[in-house]
Amino acid sequence: MNILLTGGAGFIGANLAEALLNDERVSQLRIFDNLSTGHRYNIKGLLDHPRCSFVEGDIRDIEACRAACQGMDRISHQAALGSVPRSIRDPLTTHAVNCTGTLNIFQAAVEKGVPRIVFAASSSTYGDHKALPKVEDTIGKPLSPYAVTKYVNELYADVFAKAYAINYIGLRYFNVFGPKQDPNGAYAAVIPLFFKAALHNEAPTIHGDGSFSRDFTYIDNVVQANLRALFTKEQAALNEIYNVACGDRTDLNTLWGHIRRITGSRVDAQYGPQREGDIPHSLASIKKAKQLLGYQPSHTVDEGLEEAYAFYKQLFAR
């Protein structure tokens, strides 16, 4: 199959690109990215591959989307502007990328006859719904502009499946971490920030009292779910939304303790104000993904942290 991968130079996209090029079911991989939050160095080793091509373009440009979708058999739509705090500071750009950009990809897929899109959804869609674990069919009200945009993506996917000859699978990611996740920048995620602090012998900042917990999910689990979604032949698995997680949760104080142990750091964390739009706890039910996609997490949080440490240790040694 010919696969279009949007956002392929980003953290998740670059890991997925590598897996796709190692998969014999993929004839050609076309990476489409505007390099606004992704980096060319993430895919540097892939661009010489005979089955890989790179197109620099923006999903907000409908003509670029049409050209990128030409001749494709599947679309893996990973391009997005992440971060709850960023969306609160700049909701217009978050909307333009995540809503208009995703709508462009769906429209271009219909016009170019691409039969299936697998897209990155988000656990933020659960919003203020308090019950744990999170089950796909029950959500609350969004707590940030980012969460609104990711829910809109799901609504568009459902409408397009009903109105046009196209299928989708949406994957609600829960706090993904691992190699190639950028530790720098104003909106870096907590785990790379913790590793950066530990390896520089600095105190990380924990927002709130550290009791907030997340279903941290190692990147290999996410790649597995994407591959299963792209290639599944089960009709019952199509046009559905799935949680992609470990089905376990870790609070921030415990997370820092794990990273201190792995790195040998003796620095204590410092505490700051709680972030706007943050939910207290997140835990996924992965029963649906197991049943319909055959998804089975390959890495626990601790196993993932060990592999992430090897990456960051090498990164900061440069």
Image: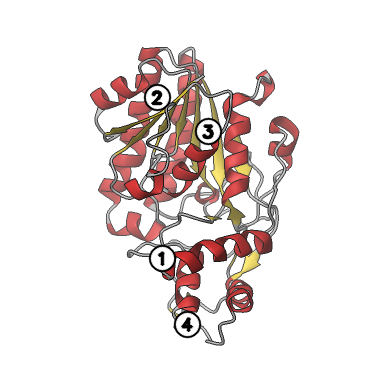
**Residue 172 vertical position relative to residue 51 in the rendered view, above or below:** below
Q: Check whether the beta carbons of the residues at disc 1 and disc 4 lie within 8 A of each other.
A: no
In percent of width and height, residue 177 lies at: 53, 56
Q: Quadrant of residue 180?
A: bottom left
* Amino acid carrying mark 4 in the image: Tyr
Depth order, front residue of 239/234:
234
The relative height of residue 182 versus residue 288 in the rendered view (above or below) is: below
**Mark found first going from the N terminus, 3 or 4:** 3
Residue located 42% across and 45% down the image: 148
Q: Are marks 3 and 4 in contact (CB under 8 Å)?
A: no
Element marked by disc 4: strand
Alpha carbons under labels 1 and 3: distance apart? 36 Å
| Whole-number angstrom distance, CA of label 3 to CA of label 4 | 41 Å
What residue appears at the point 53 percent right and 56 percent down from the top-left corner? 178
Number of numbered discs overlaid on the protein picture: 4
Q: In the rendered structure, which disc, 3 or 2, sits on the residue that comes first in sequence?
A: 3
Query: Disc 3 vs disc 2: Cβ atoms closer than 8 Å?
Result: no
- Residue 214 visible here: no
Label annotation for residue 20: 3
* Residue 181: image location, x then y, percent: 45, 56
Q: The C terminus is located in which quarter?
A: bottom left
Q: Residue at x 51, y 56 (%)?
A: 179
The residue wearing badge 2 is 106
